[in-house]
Amino acid sequence: MPKETFFNLPELKRKAVFDAAVGEFSVYMFSEASINRIVKAAQIARGSFYQYFDGKEDLFAYVIARIFTEIEEITHTWRRGGHDADALSLFMEKVYATAELNQEKPEYVRITFLQSRDKTPFVRRFFEVSDDQRWNVLQLFERDKQRGIIREDVDSSLVIDMVYTLSKELFFDVGMDGETYIKKIEAVIRIIREGIRRNSA
């Protein structure tokens, strides 16, 4: 994360550095991103960059942390079902929040999905579902089973993998078309909820 010297900078200078990083990471994966291009866009010396950050990793972590924070803040505005909402509904709230952020700051969403495909171990840690996150989601599925919302024989872990993987792949399929993306995700969730087997007459 940034050094104290970065936070001591005037707000406009901090914004210039952040905006330059956002511009770079929205076009290039972390492994291909260039500090030289970032400092040029921010109009600062390369030496000054290392007074603010230890390296590209620190800058990337700072940018991603800010983006994730904004997504979480928007997600809270979609909390319509409260704590009683089922696991898939809570996932859709995250999708709606991401779509809203895409309207306001599309470069943030481009970063999120572009960087999630970077194979660098450092980057993968940010975008893989952590053990804690997976445990929390699994607990929601188990609660849904107890409430009779989903069948007890459903492999919750597999459903989690399906939903998260498809959400990423569908984004790359439809690009920044938020409306199409939401419709496709809603269709996927509907199929998961209802299944594809035709009811017997």
Image (tube, helix red, strand yellow):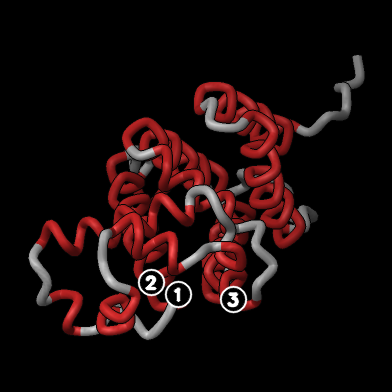
- Quick one: label 1, few (<14), some, or many (20+) residues within 10 Å? some
What residue is drawn where x is 38% and y is 71%?
59
Q: Quadrant of residue 40?
A: bottom left
Left or right of 100, for residue 17: left
Q: Position of residue 168 (x, y in %)?
A: 64, 46
Amino acid type at circle 2 is: Leu
Q: Quadrant of residue 38?
A: bottom left
For marks 3 and 1, the one nearer the N-term is 1
In the displayed orientation, state which residue is furthest to the right.
Answer: 200
Q: What element carries label 2?
A: helix
- Quick one: label 2, few (<14), some, or many (20+) residues within 10 Å? many
Q: What element carries label 3?
A: helix
- Quick one: label 3, few (<14), some, or many (20+) residues within 10 Å? few
Q: What element carries label 1?
A: helix
**For residue 106, above or below residue 174:** below
Task: Verify CB contact (< 8 Å) between mark 2 and mark 1.
Answer: yes
For marks 2 and 3, the one nearer the N-term is 2
Q: Name the residue under label 2.
A: 59
Amino acid type at circle 1 is: Lys
Q: Where is residue 106 in the image (x, y as percent from the top left)?
A: 41, 38
**For residue 177, above or below residue 86:** above
Q: Nearer the viewer, mark 3 or mark 1?
A: 1
Res. 79 in view: yes
Amino acid type at circle 3 is: Asp
**For residue 27, above or below residue 181:** below
Q: Name the residue under label 3.
A: 131
Q: Alpha carbon of mark 3 to alpha carbon of mark 1: how far?
A: 26 Å
